[in-house]
């Protein structure tokens, strides 16, 4: 019996590897949608708004709704499972796309804002792809599974901006309506992929057991460093990246130069994902987080050295790789802090904090840049980055992570 079981396990496919491929492709489609929205939302808002100062409100609402939807999304998936939850998220995205197309057809800024807010809720669901990849992976493969799923962003970095340009006039003469129709098409394609992921639903006992209180879990040194790494990495990236195109325009560079820099930044964010997991396994997650912190500091140094295109390009590539190491490192570290019954609330709390700080960073970026200048934007990130560095060093010295799954 044992020999037969062993042979069966040898020939049965590893669901974690299939899940990684499907989730990476799903993330590629999701991030392509982000590229479309980031390109056209301010322009569509400007076109529809009677008061042009409100043009970026729909994009701001999208970011706010990512933050406030992270907890409901995680709790829903705890009840109905990852696959069903992800499909619900795509349904919200499809609905949002239809609403935005209708808003553009009717010339309604308010309806466009509603659709944009729903896009934010849709985005909150697919943020959990990285955790879903870890849930069927072995401990040895977990960090690589998270990293490889994030590698799907490479596809979006290359093709997302092109899709934005292609879809802009797809439903002409309704400018930008085609872009939101493309969002709906991406959601439909993603549902087709998600139908094949293999992540078991939570068992009845797991649903009854909520595990330790969140306050107890949150006191673990490993939890503190994991959340801090992801929060700081994401917020610093949002703050600097959002301000960069404006800083380039003020410095006399062309729109094409800014697009070139942002595209390389996206490649810097996602290309390292193909080996970040391996680096974590070889050198340890804390060392990778520390390298990410140093890369963020190097980004600041390059930005403060001048305002030529080459300097903007170099700093944004460093920023992208630094984000990758801090975000994937923080996510990997977080998986060590909770039992299976606790993962929904821990992941939800983590993402609420991460995207809450991202929202603050994105909103404050333009304010700081306008009031104090480009150098002030860069000086503003030094303190939080140093705090993340100190926390990771502290955990190395303490060196007794919770290891909740042991």
Image (spheres, helix red, strand yellow):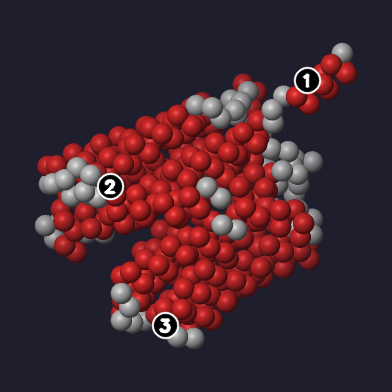
- Residue 213: which numbered mark, if any? none
| Above or below, comparing residue 340 to residue 239 in the picture | above
- The residue shown at (51%, 53%) is 154
Secondary-structure class at tag 3: loop
x, y percent for residue 88:
42, 31
Quarter of image, res 101? top left
Q: Give the residue pinned by disc 1.
A: 8
Q: Badge 1, how many Cα within 10 Å: few under 14, some, many 20+?
A: few
Q: In this rendering, does residue 231 appear at all?
A: no
C-alpha span from label 1 to label 3: 60 Å
Residue sitting nearer the eye, 344 or 143: 143
Residue 113 horizontal side relative to residue 8, left or right: left
Give the residue at mark 3: 308
Q: Name the residue: 51% across, 74% down.
A: 314
Q: On the rendered image, what quadrant is the C terminus found in?
A: top right
Vertical placement of residue 393 versus 38, above or below:
below
Q: Position of residue 284 (x, y in %)?
A: 75, 58
Residue 348, horizontal then vertical, whole percent: 53, 44
x then y, percent, for residue 169: 21, 48
Q: Is residue 215 left or right of residue 172?
A: right
For the residue carrying disc 2, how many other residues have a C-alpha within 10 Å: few (<14), some (14-19), or many (20+)? Answer: many
* Residue placed most toward the observer, 382 or 44: 44
Give 378 or 73, whichever is nearer the viewer. 378
How far apart marks 2 and 1 lie (CA) works out to 48 Å
The secondary element bearing badge 1 is classed as helix
In this figure, which residue is indicated by the disc labeled 2?
167
Closer to the N terminus: mark 2 or mark 3? Answer: 2
């Amino acid at each position: 019996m044992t020999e037969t079981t062993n042979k069966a396990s040898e020939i049965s496919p590893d669901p974690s590897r299939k899940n990684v491929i499907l989730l990476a492709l799903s993330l590629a489609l999701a991030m392509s949608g982000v590229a479309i929205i980031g390109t056209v939302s301010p322009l569509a808002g400007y076109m529809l708004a009677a008061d042009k100062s409100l043009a970026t409100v729909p994009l701001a609402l999208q970011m706010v709704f990512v933050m406030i939807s992270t907890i409901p999304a995680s709790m829903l998936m705890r009840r109905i499972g990852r696959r069903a939850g992800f499909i619900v998220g795509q349904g919200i995205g499809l609905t949002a796309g239809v609403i935005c197309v209708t808003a553009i057809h009717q010339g309604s800024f308010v309806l466009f804002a509603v659709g944009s807010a729903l896009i934010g809720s849709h985005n909150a669901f697919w943020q959990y792809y990285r955790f879903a990849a870890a849930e069927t992976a072995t401990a040895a493969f977990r960090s690589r599974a998270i990293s490889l799923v994030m590698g799907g962003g490479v596809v979006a970095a290359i093709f997302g901006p092109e899709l934005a340009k292609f879809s802009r006039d797809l439903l002409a003469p309704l400018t930008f309506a085609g872009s939101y129709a493309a969002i709906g098409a991406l959601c439909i394609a993603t549902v087709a992929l998600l139908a094949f992921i293999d992540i078991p639903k939570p068992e009845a006992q797991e649903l009854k057991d909520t595990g330790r209180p969140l306050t107890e879990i949150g006191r673990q040194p490993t939890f503190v460093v994991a959340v801090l790494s992801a929060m700081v990495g994401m917020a610093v990236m949002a703050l600097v990246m959002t301000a960069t195109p404006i800083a380039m325009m003020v410095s006399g560079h062309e729109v094409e130069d800014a697009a070139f820099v942002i595209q390389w930044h996206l490649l810097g964010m996602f290309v390292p994902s193909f080996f970040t997991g391996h680096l974590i396994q070889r050198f340890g997650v804390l060392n990778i987080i520390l390298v990410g912190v140093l890369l963020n500091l190097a980004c600041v140094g390059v930005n403060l050295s001048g305002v030529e295109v080459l300097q903007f390009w170099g700093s944004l590539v460093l920023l992208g790789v630094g984000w990758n190491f801090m975000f994937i490192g923080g996510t990997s570290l977080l998986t060590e802090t909770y039992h299976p019954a606790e993962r929904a609330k821990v992941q939800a709390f983590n993402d609420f904090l991460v995207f809450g700080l991202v929202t603050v960073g994105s909103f404050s970026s333009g304010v700081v840049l306008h009031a104090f200048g480009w150098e002030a934007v860069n000086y503003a990130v030094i303190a939080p980055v140093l705090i993340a560095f100190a926390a990771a060093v502290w955990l190395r010295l303490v060196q007794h992570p919770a290891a909740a799954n042991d």
